[in-house]
Image (tube, rainbow, N blue to C red):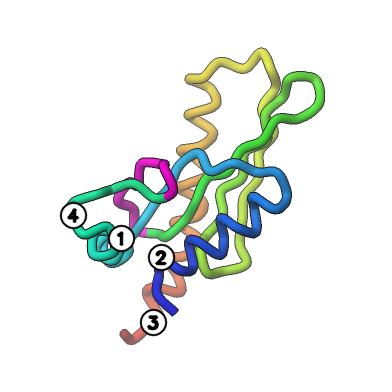
Amino acid sequence: MGRIQKFRETLAMYRKHGWHPARVLMTAEALDELRGEAGADELRFEGVDAQESPVDAMWFTRGAEGGRAAWELRQVGEPYALFEMFEADETEEDREDVRREMEARLREHVAPRAESDPS
C-alpha cells in the first residue's frame, strides 16, 4: 500500500469520528508520491497544505465542550497519537508552542525505530 493511501485511511477514520484535518506532515518520499498523484508540484492533501517532515503524520481538530478545542497528532500508518485539549482562553501562541512540543515528542518516538531500521 502506498503512503498516500495510508494518509487517506487515517483521514477516513478520523472523519468518521467528527475530526477535521488541520495540518499534514509528510516525509520527502510521501510528498513525492503526492506530487506524482497530483501530476504537478501540488503540496496539498485533501485541501490541507502538506509540509515536509521527518515523520508522516496528520493533525486533527474538533470542538469540545465549553469552547475548548481538541487537537490530535496522529502518526500515519502506526497506532500512535498525541492528544491535547486547549482551553478557550489560551492564546494561539501558547497553542502553537504546545503543538511544536508534540511534534518533537512524535519525532523522538519515531527516532529509535528509524535508527534500528536497516533499510
Residue 117 shows which numbered tag? 3
**Pick the front one: 95 or 25:** 25
Residue position for label 1: 34
Q: Is residue 92 above or below residue 54?
A: above
Q: Is residue 118 above or below residue 16?
A: below
**Pick the front one: 1 or 38:** 38
Residue position for label 2: 4
Q: Are marks 1 and 3 in contact (CB under 8 Å)?
A: no
Q: Which residues are magenta?
A: 46-54
Q: Residue furthest left?
A: 40
Q: Is residue 64 magenta?
A: no
Amino acid carrying label 2: it is Ile
Q: Earlier in the sequence, mark 2 or mark 1?
A: 2
Q: Is residue 53 magenta?
A: yes
For the C terminus, the image quarter is bottom left
Horizontal side of 36 relative to 74 (left or right) equals left
Which residue is at 61% across, 55% downward? Answer: 81
Give the alpha-carbon distance from disc 2 to disc 3, as whole Å: 21 Å
Amino acid carrying label 1: it is Leu
Q: Are marks 2 and 1 in contact (CB under 8 Å)?
A: yes
Q: Earlier in the sequence, mark 2 or mark 4?
A: 2
Name the quadrant containing residue 89: top right
Give the alpha-carbon distance from disc 2 to disc 1, as whole Å: 7 Å
Q: Nearer the viewer, mark 2 or mark 3?
A: 2
Label 2: state its secondary structure. Answer: helix
Residue position for label 4: 40
User: How many dots with numbers?
Assistant: 4
Q: Position of residue 110 (x, y in %)?
A: 46, 65
Q: Nearer the viewer, mark 4 or mark 1?
A: 4
Which residue is at 42% across, 60% downward? Answer: 56
For the N terminus, the image quarter is bottom left
